[in-house]
Image (spheres, rainbow, N blue to C red):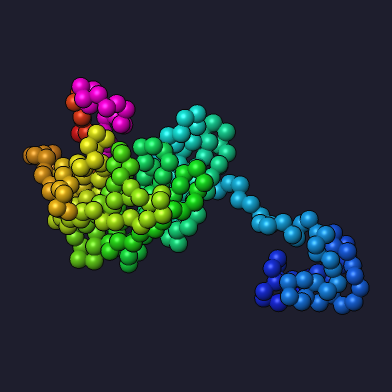
Amino acid sequence: MQFSKGPADHPVSGFIVRDEDEYGGRRRGGANEYRSGQYSGYDLSRSHKLNKDPIMELKHIIGYQADKCSSMKWSKQEGENVVLFTSGGTIIAMDSETNEQKRFFFGHSAPICCFDLNAQGTMIASGQEGQNSIIRLWDYATARCITMMTLPVVSLKCLSFSHDGRFLASAGKDSHNKELIVIWDISRVTRGEKPEIFARQTSEFNIIDLKFSPIDSSRLVSCGKENIRFWRIRDTGNIRGSAVVLQHHARNTVFTCLDFEYGFRSADKMENEALKRVFVGSKHGMVF
């Protein structure tokens, strides 16, 4: 078979084929010329190889980008053993038993720096950094992007859903090198409406991780360099913070991650009161 470079708008490969039956096309006679998406010398409507759309389908991605986004999440759909992780600008949903990659979430134009899955397991939020960082919301079942938001931070650190799915919290550094917390109201995005900023707050304290309380959608916990802080969202649109007294534990300690003792399992007040502990990890390998 011989190939020669064809027109730039060739819908398949940009090459003119000079062989008769290699691709299953039926020769009609005359010169093999490309005209408006068809060959004059072939009847491509009979070609099962060239007409398939898409020609290629992604089956597997090899790679895990821990330097940009170290998060991994378990699917919360009943009967699934699916783990979610990132590779570059793609979120991958992989069956942990068969290693089959079941879904790919495409759309980011830069490596994903953070993502989160809501408590119901139906929605994913993912972010990328830039002059204005971008957050995308995804439908988990279809891998479809529901909506997109931008916020004025150049270094996006973390995203967190509230347990009831109403809010999404984002934290990062703005152009003035201050930490900016933004709380988005996403309760109506599934009905086609845009997310709205419910509250925002700047802070002088470093934030590396931020999470909503699993029992109260108005409270959050953050950690960072030499600080752990509790936050409360007020109806006025402000977010008030109070510091945990760490004494000598704070000195030169970078707190890198945090989590609550349990997920949102029960609305029973007695159980919730008994399981309020927060675990915070440090760069030195200690858990507080």
Point 83% across, 59% down: residue: 46
Can you say whether 7 is above or below 19 in the image? below
Is residue 254 something one can see in this rendering?
A: no
Query: Residue 71: x, y in percent?
Result: 38, 44
In the picture, the quarter occupied by the N terminus is: bottom right
Can you say whether 182 is above or below 271 in the image? below
Number of numbered discs visible in the structure rendering: 0
Camera-side residue of 283 and 209: 209
Reply yes or no: does residue 45 show up in magenta. no
Point 29% across, 26% down: residue: 266
Q: What range is drawn magenta here?
A: 257-272
Name which quarter of the figure residue 55 lies in: bottom right
Point 77% across, 71% down: residue: 38
Q: Is residue 95 left or right of residue 254?
A: right
Camera-side residue of 167 and 222: 167
Query: Residue 209: x, y in percent?
Result: 26, 46
Can you say whether 133 is above or below 4 in the image? above
Query: Residue 276: x, y in percent?
Result: 20, 29
Point 45% across, 58% down: residue: 108
Camera-side residue of 160 and 69: 160
Camera-side residue of 188 and 8: 188
